[in-house]
Image (cartoon, grey):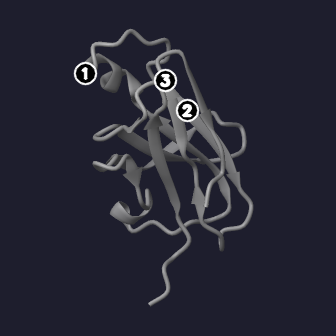
Amino acid sequence: MELQPHISTHVLDTSRGVPVKNLPVSLYKASDNTNNSWILLSESFTSTNGRCANLLETTSQILTVGRYKIVFNVESYFISMKTPALYPLIEIIIDIKNSLENYHLPLLLNPFGFSTYRGT
């Protein structure tokens, strides 16, 4: 059985060198290209290895062309670590132009910064 194209993520705390487990992650799709209205597609939590393998899987959504937003609720993580941090939420907005590909979007996180990229 061939896997459907998907959006996945992986969150690493670069200040501690560990994956971030149990982090709330939400996936939205824009109802149009103005970014004024977002439709919640799924809510998930990172696994013990910091991953969300397929953010569309929990709701049986199919990846389609369009604008998507992944929201990472990092505030809860830093509060649990008793670490002051600058960003309570991190939103990553991407345009899916080819719905036949997988989109893996890791988040490298520390209390006062973050970075993301398209992984494999």
For the residue pair 73 and 63, the one nearer the viewer reads as 73
Mark earlier in primary sequence (2, 1): 1
Q: Amino acid at mark 3?
A: Asn
Residue 114 position in % (x across, y down): 57, 27
Residue shown at the point (40%, 51%) measured from the top left: 51
* 88 to 51, vertically: above or below: above
Q: Which mark is residue 56?
A: none
Mark 2 secondary-structure assignment? strand
Q: Nearer the viewer, residue 65 or 114?
A: 114
Q: Which residue is mark 2?
A: 91
| Along the viewing direction, whichever of 92 and 63 lies nearer the viewer | 92
Q: Residues within 10 Å of mark 3 (few under 14, many from 20)?
A: many
- Point 49% across, 23% down: residue: 110
Residue 78 lies left or right of residue 28; in this view the side is left
x%, y% of residue 106? 54, 46
Q: For mark 3, give the secondary structure.
A: strand
Choose top left, top right, bottom left or bottom right for residue 73: top left
**Label 2 environment density (alpha carbons within 10 Å; few <14, some 14–19, many ≥20):** few
Residue to which mark 1 is pinned: 80
Indicate the amino acid at tag 2: Glu
Farthest residue to the bottom: give it: 1
